[in-house]
Amino acid sequence: MVEYPALELPENPRLAGNITHFARALRRAGLPIGPGRVIDAIRAVETAGFTERRDFYWTLHACFVNRPEHRVIFRQIFRLYWRDPRYLEHMMAAMLPAIRGVQEERAGQAGEKRAAEALLDGAEAPDFDPDKDDDDGETEIEVDASFTTSAQEKLKTLDFEQMSTAEMAAAKRMLARMRLPVEPMPTRRMQAALRGGVAPAKTLRAAMRTGGEIRTIARRAPRTRWPNLVVLCDISGSMSQYSRVVLHFLHAVSNAKGAGWAKVHAFTFGTRLTNITRHLDHRDVDAALAAAGAEAQDWEGGTRIGECIEAFNRDWSRRVLGQGAVVLLITDGLDRGAPEVLAKQMQRLHLSAKRLIWLNPLLRWDAFAPKARGIAAMLPHVDSFRAGHSIASLEELAEVISRKDDVGEKARLMGLIGK
């Protein structure tokens, strides 16, 4: 056990208190920082000293960062806390949703919104006597972000598009803990087992060692393996809010060790198809989604579902849909192309996948009907048709994804086509 001697601090330890507050913000943003590291950081600054901002930055960086994926968050929180002249304005701008048609002063950076949430979400400033401080123009913001059980249940049923910034931050934290379990699949290859069918070859080989006398009967059973998960996510203008949240969920699924999936392949589409699988492998969710956004140039654009699925069937189907892959198609189905092309490509996608599950946020409406031509063309070629607008709908998906008999709302809506 490490023992620390008494730490000599000034009577008004403003720097030590700010370092403590800074460490609390880092911990809220996901960095594993305990009291020991805070003491080490204070002692390191006291020992090394600093004359430039750069020296102070790398001293704290050496104490608080030990994983590559934490560098982005540390950099953003450091920039906002120590101290951007427009500190509060930048944090509030990062928390507010972007308004279409209004050009922002600067583009958002990876981890910036997460850093702002960590600084504003209940991270109280150190309690100093204002009479002893010349700079009393600071604004203290205190947010109570605690959620009771009933509040969490309400949050689960809330539409992603109707969530406030605080509710969206809480929803993302809940999605980061969710899993998408799947049952293993039997294969044609066999393995030794205590129970199962007779293994003739192994039994006869053992009998030859005892002069042809069969003393034990070897048994075998099929090997099992995990299937792949392939996700096709619509990032057009009508789906942008839902697709961002779903990609947070997929990042958690793809980075969960032992969650059951052999590999998670992710593609985005709007006006073109983009493979973002390698970006989701990054452990930090903000850096992963920032890289995925830079790769996909058609965010919040138009929709060409038929052409994008055709590109997937042509370029990627044989690579990622082998060995019984499960496909999640996340789109509202509002396509501007020819419905005949869309129906043909959906049929081919359905035949190539073990299961094709369609998540559509429009199902949140009770009066939803497949009147759009794109939806009517796609619906017959999916195994299950489910809502995808809330945490509760994703939890339901996790419960039924391994059920072969689950069709969701498909049977009911198929009867409404043509009426």
Image (cartoon, rainbow, N blue to C red):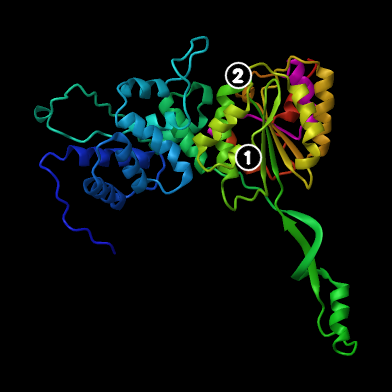
Residue at horizontal 77%, vertical 56%?
186
Q: Which residue is mark 2?
A: 300
Residue at the bottom extreme, as displayed: 211
Please say whether residue 380 is one of the residues in the magenta stretch.
yes
Residue 416 seen in the figure? no
Residue at the top extreme, as displayed: 101
Residue at horizontal 60%, vertical 19%?
300
Where does residue 119 sit, x and y in percent of width and height?
34, 32
Position of residue 4 relative to residue 203, above or below, is above
Residue type marked 1? Arg
Nearer-the-camera pick, 284 or 358: 284
Magenta span covers which residues?
A: 370-392
Spatial distance from mark 1 to mark 2, Cα to Cα?
22 Å
Nearer-the-camera pick, 286 or 229: 286
Quarter of the figure with the C terminus: top right
Residue type marked 2? Glu
Callout 1: SS: helix
Residue 280 relative to residue 275: left or right: left
Quarter of the figure with the N terminus: bottom left
